[in-house]
Image (cartoon, rainbow, N blue to C red):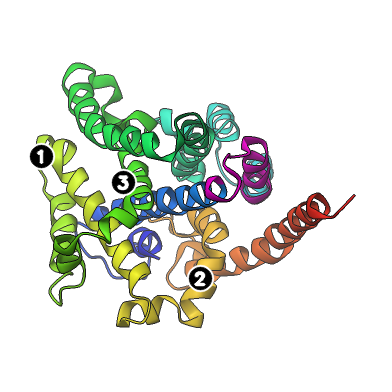
Amino acid sequence: MIVLFAHANGTRGAPKIGHLEVFADLGVRTFFVISGFLITTLLVGEYGKRGRISLRDFYIRRVYRIFPAFYVYLAVMLGVAALGWIALPAEDVVFAATYTMNVHAHRAWWLGHLWSLAVEEQFYLLWPLVVSLLRPRRALWFAIAAIAIAPVLRVVAWIAWPAVRPLTDQAFPFVFDALATGCVLALAREHLEGSATYLMWLDAPSFWLIPLAGVVALAVPFTAFNLGIGVTLGNLGIAMAIHRCVRHPSYPLGRVLESRPFVFVGALSYSLYLWQQPFVNRHASGIINTFPVHLALAFGLAIVSYYLVEQPVLALRARRAARKRAPV
């Protein structure tokens, strides 16, 4: 919803609020931190039950979850381009189809948002392997090291490698610390909840000043600060906000996030992220790109994708899992 709000800003018929780019970054960054937390929680849970992690099963589950809606969207965009309605460079299609859009800086609008899904797919490929090889305790230190190393890589790349500057907020080596922050939260959660000092900050009535400070840090316009420490502070603020909501679902924000409208948007979120891009486009002025028509179309296509693509495929995944559990 944060990304959708930021993208809609300045579209035809919508109010224009200046300097909202930070909200698009905040939305995707929150997605990364949540993903690191969720995936690591699932991996640690499997390790705790079985004493190992089945990489094969993990990758198969991700294929069922991610590929169908993604490639349907890509196929539709190819069809629209074939009709001559949009211009879609061939190299954009190649980078998108191979989940490497996050190393391709100069791209058309229609597939540009797929860079974040490329980051996710690379994370899915690497992190379960790390946890499986290192085991959770050593994987924690690996993730902490990633949080420390990524700012250095960003600053060095910005100074020494000007050609990659457009990718310092997208290429995996420069953004894996957001995912790693969520991983650390999942791996260290029990330890953190045993710390009286940490809980004092987490449960304080004034807690929201901490994530607010993280958002302010993300918005600081000085490149050296942003790449070096601003991003790290933003990630930590997001992680603490997630921890508070998970720890206290009965608090006001927790109740809002667990309300039926928010849960419904959460269910749609993957397809909604895919399909908002062609419509919520401030660079276009057609009726389909006009507020609030573009939001209605984005939600409409997301609902179609959710019920006609995601749900049937997930049902297949559930049947596969049931067959595996069935006694021979």
* Mark found first going from the N terminus, 2 or 1: 1
Label 3 Cα neighbours within 10 Å, binned few <14 / some 14-19 / many ≥20: many
User: Mark 2 highlights which residue?
Assistant: 265
Which residue is pictured at 33% across the width and 62% down the height?
Answer: 242
**Measured along the vertical axis of the image, is residue 257 above or below residue 27?**
below
Circle 2: element type: helix
Q: State which mark lies toward you, 2 or 3.
A: 3
Residue 10 appears in view:
no
Label 2 Cα neighbours within 10 Å, binned few <14 / some 14-19 / many ≥20: some
- For residue 181, the mark is 3
Residue 164 sits in quarter: top left
Q: Amino acid at mark 2?
A: Val
* Mark found first going from the N terminus, 1 or 3: 3
**In front of the other: 113 or 314:** 314
- Picture coordinates of residue 227, whole percent (x, y): 18, 37
Quarter in which the N terminus is drawn: bottom left
**In front of the other: 224 or 189:** 189
- For residue 316, the mark is none
User: Mark 1 highlights which residue?
Assistant: 225
Q: State which mark lies toward you, 1 or 3.
A: 3
Residue 316 sits in quarter: bottom right
